[in-house]
Image: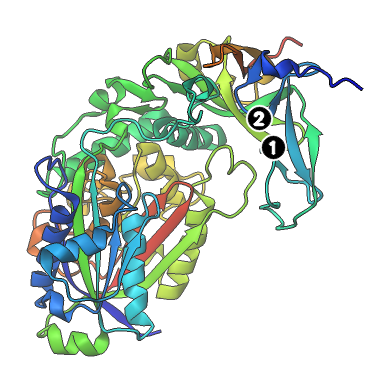
Amino acid sequence: MRNVYVLGTGMLKFGRYPDKTVPELGGEAALLALKDAGVTIKDVELFACGNLFQANAMVGQRILQQIGQTGIPVVNVSNACATGSTAFREAYMSVASGMCDVAMAVGVEQMGKQGLLGGGGGGSDPAYATEGKVGSGLMPAVFGQAGIEHMRKYGTKPEHFAKISVKSHKHATKNPFSQYRNEVSLEDVMNARMVAFPNTLYMCCPTGDGAAAAIVVSEEKLKQLAGGRKRPRVAASVLTSDPWTERDLTLPDVSTLTRRASKQAYEKAGIGPKDIALTELHDCFATAELVHYENLGLCGDGEAGAFIDSGGGVHPALGGKAPVNVSGGLLSKGHPLGATGVANICEVVWHLTEDARAKDRLVPNAKAGQAHVIGLGSACTINILTI
Amino acid sequence: MAEQAQPTDTGPRPILPFLKLQPKPHLEGLKCTCGAIYLDPKRVACSKCGADGKLSPIQLSDKGKVWVFSVVHQSFPGIKTPYVTAIVDLPEGVSVRANLVDVDPVQAQKEPQKIFNMPVELTTGVAAKDREGRDVISFSYRPSKN
């Protein structure tokens, strides 16, 4: 496999764009990335497009119908919340394999004010719908239970999850691309409306619209196109699915496939968690972030509570260490499902390249960063970037 | 021989196929020779070991222990909140997701450790009437009486 570099990135502020279409959002992000890379759509040889809610509607081709129909191969990707990051991996692989030298990944989603996700069942007769009658499949409860499992095993307290929300909201105040930029106190989070124990409102990510794009290139193309700029290398791009585990089919196990992906990613990149300057991880709920501290090796098993209490995950400028989700994370930055996996790669790239788009929140001397995504059902991606 | 009348034609129906109503309500799984148990009424093969043709029905115990839970405060219209949703481990080695009833949701949040490992038993009741006017029977777990 050949070395692959991220030449350009683009992202729309996450939020709500009721007056725009999915191809418009994706097309705008694509243009930002192309301009950032210093190339045009005519240079792109493969396009991987990640979108979930219009997965049957050729979103990639419709984006090209907005920005340039060059006839290149387009692959439309759907992989739950890991949709965008899986699209990025498709672009990465097309370059790594030698199939092409310039590839583009776009993640895009339009959710509006869609509320609770998950649940359902019952077919055509609502009398057979199981949600709330046979337990809950709604995301806040599913991920609540992942946190409660940690409480059960290690005595973790609801305050630990709440502190994560406080931290990520504070981070988001420095990110103009974030859907929400309000600070919240520990009391605010603890006293907020409970959605599904232990996740209160501020421990749940919002729904919204957004798009992000990345242009990846071979080493040869990098030399031609980078103009002396240092660009991050994709040191690892890993995808796993959920292996059989004891309760996975009843309570989705988001840890085992993350641990497998993490081990593979560190091995492939030849580095360890101590070398990672920043982590963007899949905090769809505060409870998820806490278990992933351990799954990604940022602290030992059972140590996530102590990690949080000692400033773990907090931006160094705020006195913390091993910063996690300095973008604000899904909790604040937002989670337009298909866009998320490309957006968190943008964030890591911006820190490694000291990009102006992250100027108020740069993690100093960042040489390596990782972006982790879980799509429930389940898919896990980890991309490690180094410079 | 006259065909026996099918009581389920007009009688109660289970909300999920792995809930069996006769001779008394119980859960039925599929067990593979490798030990894995599934709550599906049918499946192609075993997703633990990959073997096909090695799955056979197993009647599951009506008692179990709570592994974890959550308290749902926000749900779809028509669902009464708050309620406790739980993952219950059965002695056969399979877990079931269900509502946990006869437990105070607010108290469960205050003292979650009292819910972990709680011995529970299966209980059933009418959850709805379907379009044909049949009772739809659902199941949940409640603290075990013995």
Q: Residue furthest front?
A: B1
Q: Position of residue A76 (x, y in %)?
A: 33, 62
Chain ID for label 2?
Answer: B
Packing grade of label 1 (10 A; few <14, some 14-19, many >=20) is few
Quickly name the residue at label 2: B17
Q: Amino acid at mark 2?
A: Pro
Q: Position of residue B43 (x, y in %)?
A: 68, 46
Q: Position of residue B123 (x, y in %)?
A: 67, 14
Residue A97 versus residue B132: which sits nearer the camera?
Answer: B132
Q: Quadrant of the N terminus of chain A?
A: bottom left
Q: Earlier in the sequence, mark 2 or mark 1?
A: 2
Residue A133 versus residue B111: which sits nearer the camera?
Answer: A133
Q: Secondary structure at mark 2?
A: loop
For image coordinates 66% across by 38% down, the residue present is: B40
Quadrant in the picture for residue B1: top right
Q: Amino acid at mark 1?
A: Pro
For image coordinates 31% across by 39% down, the residue present is: A164
- For the residues labelled 2 and 1, say whether their Cβ atoms are less than 8 Å apart: yes
Chain ID for label 1?
Answer: B
Q: Residue furthest right?
A: B1
Query: Would residue A364 be seen by someone viewing this image from the given angle?
Result: no
Q: Quadrant of the C terminus of chain A?
A: bottom left
Residue B131 versus residue A308: which sits nearer the camera?
Answer: B131
Query: Would residue A44 be seen by someone viewing this image from the given angle?
Result: yes
Q: Is residue A278 left or right of residue B131?
A: left
Q: In the image, which disc is placed on residue B130?
A: none
Quadrant in the picture for residue A356: bottom left
Q: Secondary structure at mark 1?
A: loop
Quickly name the residue at label 1: B41
For image coordinates 31% across by 66% down, the residue present is: A88
